[in-house]
């Protein structure tokens, strides 16, 4: 008779076999009842709705949402395909949101499907799916993204409700900006005689500074005897809008987020200070804050470090051979990496204080900060040397967050655009707030993004004359909530106000 451990091992093999087929949505029929109940009992499965499950992590706490947010899009793909075959599609609006690079998990996913009965299905963690029996895209208007069935951007722009441009202005502008010209849209507008929509899209192009496309749509409709009246569907007009043609929606999205958010930041920050006259004195103040900064920054990331450990690492008295326990070794290596990275960041700060463009400094140096953070783990044999090569090559998910960072290919498009914006920015407060936020929004590395993001923030602080600023671990919940609001709701105000409050404030001492 098999032991309990052998039974669990066999159950995990059954789950692994199902996952090997590419499925994320696990159906009751995919596993025997005995296997299913055993996996649920030990936390390796999580029920989404009756008869449907996702793989889970047994160590997750009650109410933990990470496994669901990580699985959401793939679960919906499998669930809808199992129910409707290929006779389903996300709505035009949701198609545009995804194709604009916004993969945030929605509270309610709207789907069109043949044979749907206009029903609501409640999932876990406050999410749901509503399926409606609406028209599906024609074959020439259909697209797929990671297995999700969508409307092509041109078809979706025509089919989307007018309110889309008000509810999702960044996504709408992103999609419009990726259009090489107006021809694909105009062909569909003429084919359907869509005079009102033509006027709306002409106004939308005009809003983003693409006058040629706006004029082409109106002229094309007039040539076919359609009277299209231009109407701007956006509520606002962004003042600084370099709407360059770029095939990557992620690049456009980063530029648009920057433009949209920058206007809300300066008024919420204290006035910029004069640059430090005595660079050496400023650097001594940075050195004096090292222990406090290391303690709080590492603690925010979940490491259990003490002032004694940080001081031993700084003084060269820490020996990894003395910390045999896995947890102690992990904390020690993290502290050692932070010390090495801090030395590299100080050189970046010095260059910024001496007048170098801080955006260019961060662009040139941030990879070195990352490498120093994790060099001790390479030395210890925990990481391979190639792990320090550069930006991540795999997907990454944030614990408990609805925001899904950019895919690896998009990271390589977005990071040069980010540093271009950072370099060109003239408003110090914007460099500080968006430098930190957009960096962690992209999440260029598999690990260490929060630490390097705070390093980048402090290089921008120094360039503006502000003191080195520590985010205390006691404020972690507010800090993470403000980042989540910026990522999911595109509201930068709470994060800007949070950072502004930290400047010059006393920080709780490390223990």
Image (tube, rainbow, N blue to C red):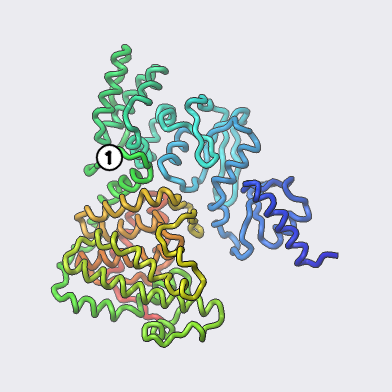
In this rendered view, identify the residue nearer to me: 333 or 63. Answer: 333
Q: Residue at x 35, y 68 (%)?
A: 369
Q: Quadrant of the N terminus?
A: bottom right
Image x and y of residue 4, in percent: 78, 66
Image x and y of residue 270, in percent: 22, 63
Decide: few, some or many residues near mark 1? Use Cα within 10 Å; few <14, some 14-19, many ≥20: some
| Residue farthest to the top, as pictured | 225
In this rendered view, identify the residue nearer to me: 255 or 334. Answer: 334
**Residue 478, visible in the rendered structure:** no
Q: Which residue is mark 1?
A: 244
Against 147, is 302 above or below?
below
Against 493, is 211 above or below?
above
Image x and y of residue 195, in percent: 35, 19
Quarter holding residue 312: bottom left
Q: Is residue 389 left or right of residue 350?
A: right
Against 338, is 47 above or below?
above
Q: How many marks?
A: 1
In this rendered view, identify the residue nearer to me: 15 or 474. Answer: 15
In this rendered view, identify the residue nearer to me: 371 or 61. Answer: 371
Q: Residue at x 26, y 55 (%)?
A: 422
Indicate the secondary structure of the residue bearing disc 1.
Answer: loop
**Residue 429, visible in the rendered structure:** yes
| Residue farthest to the bottom, as pictured | 317
Quarter holding residue 455: bottom left
Q: Is residue 152 left or right of residue 35?
A: left
Q: Residue at x 34, y 23 (%)?
A: 198
Image x and y of residue 184, in percent: 38, 25
């Amino acid at each position: 008779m098999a032991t309990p451990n052998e039974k669990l091992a066999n159950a995990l093999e059954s789950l692994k076999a199902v996952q090997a087929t590419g499925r994320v949505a696990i159906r009751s029929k995919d596993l025997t009842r005995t296997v299913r109940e055993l996996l649920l009992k030990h936390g390796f499965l999580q029920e989404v709705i009756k008869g449907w499950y996702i793989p889970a992590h047994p160590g997750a706490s009650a109410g933990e949402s990470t496994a669901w947010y990580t699985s959401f899009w793939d679960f919906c793909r499998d669930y809808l395909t199992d129910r409707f075959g290929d006779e389903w599609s996300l709505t035009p609006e949701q198609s545009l949101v995804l194709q604009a690079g916004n993969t945030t998990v929605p509270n309610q996913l709207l789907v069109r499907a043949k044979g749907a009965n206009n029903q609501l299905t409640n999932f876990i963690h406050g999410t749901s799916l509503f399926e409606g029996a609406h028209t599906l895209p024609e074959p020439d208007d259909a697209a797929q993204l990671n297995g999700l069935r969508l409307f092509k951007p041109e078809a979706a722009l025509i089919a989307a409700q007018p309110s889309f441009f008000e509810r999702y202005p960044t996504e709408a502008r992103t999609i419009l900006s990726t259009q090489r010209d107006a021809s694909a849209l105009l062909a569909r507008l003429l084919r359907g005689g869509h005079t009102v929509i033509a006027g709306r899209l002409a106004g939308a192009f005009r809003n983003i500074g693409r006058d040629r496309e706006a004029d082409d749509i109106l002229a094309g409709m007039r040539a076919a005897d359609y009277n299209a009246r231009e109407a701007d569907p956006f509520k606002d007009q962004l003042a600084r809008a370099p709407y360059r043609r770029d095939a990557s929606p992620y690049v456009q999205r980063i530029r648009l987020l920057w433009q949209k958010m920058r206007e809300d930041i300066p008024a919420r920050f204290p006035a910029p200070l004069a640059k430090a006259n005595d660079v050496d004195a400023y650097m001594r103040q940075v050195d004096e804050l090292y222990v406090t900064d290391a303690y709080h920054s590492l603690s925010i990331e979940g490491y259990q470090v003490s002032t004694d450990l940080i001081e031993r690492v700084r003084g060269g008295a820490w020996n990894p051979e003395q910390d045999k326990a896995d947890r102690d070794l992990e904390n020690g290596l993290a502290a050692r990496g932070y010390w090495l990275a801090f030395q590299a960041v100080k050189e970046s700060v010095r260059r910024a204080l001496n007048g170098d463009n801080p955006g260019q400094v961060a662009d040139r140096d941030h990879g070195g900060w990352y490498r120093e953070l994790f060099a001790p783990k390479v030395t210890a044999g925990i990481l391979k040397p190639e792990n320090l090569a550069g930006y991540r090559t795999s997907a990454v998910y944030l614990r408990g967050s609805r925001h899904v960072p950019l895919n690896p290919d998009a990271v390589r498009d977005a990071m040069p655009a980010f540093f271009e914006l950072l370099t060109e920015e003239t408003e110090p407060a914007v460099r500080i707030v968006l430098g930190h936020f957009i960096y962690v929004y992209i999440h260029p590395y598999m690990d260490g993004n929060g630490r390097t993001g705070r390093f980048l923030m402090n290089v921008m602080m120094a360039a503006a004359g502000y003191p080195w600023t520590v985010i205390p671990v006691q404020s972690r919940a507010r800090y993470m909530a403000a980042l989540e609001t910026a990522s999911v709701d595109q509201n930068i105000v709470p994060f800007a106000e949070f950072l502004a409050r930290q400047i010059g404030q006393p920080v709780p001492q490390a223990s």
